[in-house]
């Protein structure tokens, strides 16, 4: 399984970006996908996740109300719409996929729940 993330770039505070993540395998066989982010010297942190079947979404408190995760079943693509961006959103954003049994709710935000990762796309928010 290969995940290809794109859409990162440089944006001013208050602006918007949309990240995309395309999956090489049919997503009907995956149970969840998510976005994580990482800055140098810090651990990779959860941003948002979505159950592929049913579409239930989960968000980190820091992005709730500003970011929206969605998916396109036909295109096997995951999206992250990021609005009202802040300088502290600057990070490399990674998409991830869970193929296999559906994670329990508490596991949706855990890095260890996901068994495939994309290469990351850099988002830089200037003040």
Image (spheres, rainbow, N blue to C red):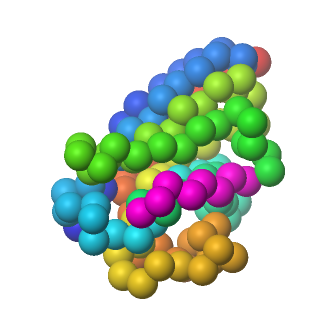
Q: Which residue is located at x 73 percent, y 53 percent?
A: 60
**Left or right position of 109 against 27:** right
Q: Which residue is located at x 41 percent, y 31 percent?
A: 7
Q: Is residue 42 above or below residue 112?
A: above
Nearer to me, 92 or 53: 53
**Left or right position of 32 against 23:** right
**Left or right position of 33 against 11:** left
Whether residue 7 appears in magenta in the rendering, the answer is no
Outermost residue on the bottom side: it is: 101
Nearer to me, 101 or 36: 101
Q: Residue 73: horizontal and vertical position, in percent? A: 30, 49
**Left or right position of 7 against 66:** left
Outermost residue on the front side: it is: 54
Residue 112 placement: quadrant: bottom right
Q: Residue 88: horizontal and vertical position, in percent? A: 75, 37
What predominant SS class does the magenta segment belong to?
loop
Q: Is residue 35 above or below residue 9?
A: below
Residue 58 placement: quadrant: bottom right
Nearer to me, 21 or 92: 21
Outermost residue on the right side: it is: 61
Please identify the quadrant where the C terminus is shown: top right
Whether residue 55 appears in magenta in the rendering, the answer is yes
Q: Which residue is located at x 51 percent, y 39 percent?
A: 80
Residue 84 placement: quadrant: top right
Q: Residue 20: horizontal and vertical position, in percent? A: 39, 39
Asked whether residue 36 appears in the rendered view, the answer is: no
Please identify the quadrant where the N terminus is shown: bottom left
Q: Is residue 113 above or below residue 17?
A: below
Tell me where the magenta segment starts and ends, as one range: 53-60
Asked whether residue 62 appears in the rendered view, the answer is: yes
Q: Residue 21: horizontal and vertical position, in percent? A: 36, 46
Q: Which residue is located at x 42 percent, y 60 percent?
A: 52
């Amino acid at each position: 399984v290969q995940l290809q993330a794109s859409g990162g770039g440089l944006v001013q505070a208050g602006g918007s970006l949309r990240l995309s993540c395309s999956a090489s395998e049919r997503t009907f066989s995956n149970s969840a996908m998510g976005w994580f982010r990482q800055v140098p010297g810090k651990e990779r942190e959860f941003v948002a996740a979505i159950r592929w079947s049913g579409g239930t979404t989960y968000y980190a408190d820091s992005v709730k109300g500003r970011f929206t995760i969605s998916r396109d079943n036909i295109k096997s693509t995951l999206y992250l719409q990021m609005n009202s961006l802040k300088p502290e959103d600057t990070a490399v954003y990674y998409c991830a996929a869970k193929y296999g049994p559906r994670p329990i709710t508490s596991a949706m935000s855990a890095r260890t729940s996901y068994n495939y990762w994309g290469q990351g796309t850099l988002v830089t928010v200037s003040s």
